[in-house]
Image: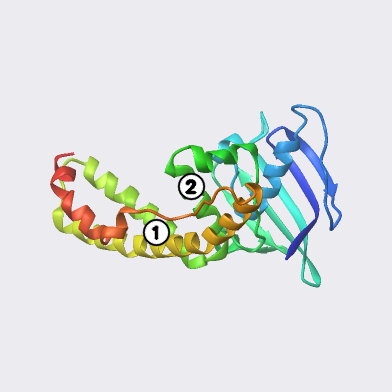
Amino acid sequence: MAVLRKIVVQDFRNISLAELSFSSNVNCISGGNGEGKTNLMDAIYYLSMTKSSFSSSDRYCFRHGTDSFSLSGTYRMKDIDSRFSIRVTSGGEKKLRKDEKLYGRVSDHVGEIPIVMVSPSDIALVSDSGEDRRRFLNLVLSQMDPEYLSAMQQYNKLLAQRNQLLKNGTVDISLLEIMDESLSYHADKIYVTRKAFAEKLSPVASGYYGLLSGGREQVRVAYRSDLSSGPLSELLASNRPKDAVL
């Protein structure tokens, strides 16, 4: 397990420059409202996931008036210390290093230092839309399974291309069929992995909920998807006349 020993934060959100060291046990961060406690937590999260826990765009992570931010952390990895650093510019450049060695791809880092962020907004997992639950699954599974992360990246890229093709007005059916098959291939990996994870999570969630409720109530976790009834390629084919009109 990776243990964070030290972090340096520069120009991230409202933090101009901060350097903190941590113990290997429980660490408590205290301070007044707006002093940067949550932003420090987000900086630690960013070092693990290469993105913010609270916003989908990096443009909200720059301190006002700056055009770049940088984070570095020293982690105890088994019996040695490793240093991870990342620098992001407003032009979209993102460079990530481990022990001063540049990663070939930023996504190769995800899962290297696993992290879980817990906040009051997590109530959305049970009270809000399925989008929040899918986001939770993606964050967890991307750290556990590099193939899942790759499937998600390829799926999202293909979906954006497919949507652009449909917006162009003239639909090439043969090209659409090829894209649908590729989407279906990646969607199957995503579906199978999510379903297996939900099946493993269900008895754990049920056990803890039973303790909290004193055994008076039972819950279970199940993954529901349209892919339960067939591959994505068939679902897309059935909607192709509608897509052609759009």
Badge 2 amino acid: Arg
Closer-to-camera residue (86/234): 234
Circle 1 residues within 10 Å: few <14, some 14–19, many ≥20: some
Q: Quadrant of residue 140?
A: bottom right
Residue 100 lies, with reference to residue 78, above or below; the image says above
Q: Is residue 124 above or below residue 50?
A: above
Disc 2 secondary structure class: helix
Q: x and y percent of residue 144 in the render?
A: 56, 64
* Mark 2 crowd level (few <14, some 14–19, many ≥20, 10 Å Cα): some
Outermost residue toward the bottom in this view: 79
Q: Specify the farthest residue to the front.
A: 216
Residue 236: image tag: none
Residue under the image location 78 percent in, 48 percent down:
8
Q: How many marks?
A: 2
In this view, the residue in front, 159 or 170, is 159
**Residue 45 can be seen in this image:** yes
The answer to which of 33 and 193 lies nearer the viewer is 193
Q: Amino acid at mark 1?
A: Gln
Residue carrying label 2: 133
Q: Are marks 2 and 1 in contact (CB under 8 Å)?
A: no
- In the drawing, does residue 79 fall left or right of residue 205? right
Left/right placement of residue 97 relative to residue 163 reads right
Q: Which residue is mark 1?
A: 154
Tag in front: 2 or 1: 2
Q: Is residue 33 left or right of residue 162?
A: right
- Gap between marks 2 and 1, in whole Å? 20 Å
Q: What is the image's colouring?
A: rainbow
Q: Position of residue 96 (x, y in %)?
A: 64, 56
Point 65% across, 48% down: residue: 212
